[in-house]
Amino acid sequence: HRRVAILISGGGSNMAALLESMTGDHPARPVLVLSNDPAAGGLALARAAGVPTAAVDHRPFGRDRAAFEADLSAHLDRAAPDILCLAGFMRVLTAGFVGRHAGRMLNIHPSLLPKYPGLNTHARALEAGDTQAGCTVHEVIADLDAGPVLGQARVPVLPDDTPDRLAARVLPWEHRLYPAVLRRFAAGDRTPVLLP
Ligand code: GAR
């Protein structure tokens, strides 16, 4: 099996979808869930699923991203993942860290990239008057939210949408898209997954 580490910052609903998918004939298995927030709800979910967890609180490191990443890397080195999945991981990673994991790090982002990299994606889609929104899984490169697209899911924007309502419509598609992309990627297939 391909060894998968999942990096989270929060509730971990995408992490949970990934964990649930990695059974049976799936080519990968989870080996570590790693959070930058020791209070992240996803850590308890992972422990309940029997997956090893670790947390490296980024706050004591201040602006020293390299030192924070050195601690992250110590955990990752022990787990020896073949694939890293960022799943609601809200820290920007340095080019050095990304380079050490080139070609094996994925991220899910709540917009139809290349539209709306960064934060507040749903509010920005509504402000722009977009008629479609969605989510993207992409390979991570040093530029934020800019790597090759490995999958996208589209949803309609509805007349009464708010950022929260749109997020609630997109999130279930994140939970379908990310496992579908990981399954292909772990099997060595980088053909984009297009949903629905
Ligand atoms: C998800 O919507 C994910 O796409 C987004 O954070 C949420 C995490 O939810 N990620 C980003 O905004 C990355 N910049 P989860 O913890 O329940 O998976």
Image (cartoon, rainbow, N blue to C red):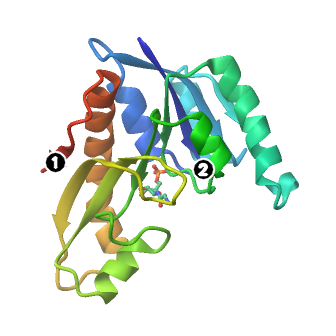
Vertical order, 64 against 100 (above or below): below
Q: Position of residue 144 (x, y in %)?
A: 51, 60
Q: Position of residue 71 (x, y in %)?
A: 78, 36
Q: Amino acid at mark 1?
A: Leu
Q: Residue at x 72, y 37 (%)?
A: 72
Q: Is any part of residue 91 visible from this angle? A: yes
Looking at the image, which residue sits at the far right?
60
The x and y percentages for residue 190 are 26, 34
- Secondary structure beneath dot 2 equals loop
Judging by the rendered image, the residue that carries numbered circle 1 is: 194
Residue lying at 36% horizontally and 22% vertically, measured from the top left: 22
Q: Quadrant of residue 175?
A: top left
Residue 67 appears in which quarter of the rendering?
Answer: top right
100 lies left or right of 166: right
Q: Earlier in the sequence, mark 1 or mark 2?
A: 2
Q: Secondary structure at mark 1?
A: strand
The answer for how far apart the CA atoms under marks 1 and 2 are is 26 Å
The three-letter code of the residue at mark 2 reads Ser
Q: Is residue 57 visible?
A: no
Tell me what residue is drawn at x 58 percent, y 56 percent. Answer: 90
Q: Which residue is mark 2?
A: 9
The spot of residue 160 in percent (x, y) is 22, 85
Does ligand 1 reach within 8 Å of label 2's beta carbon? yes
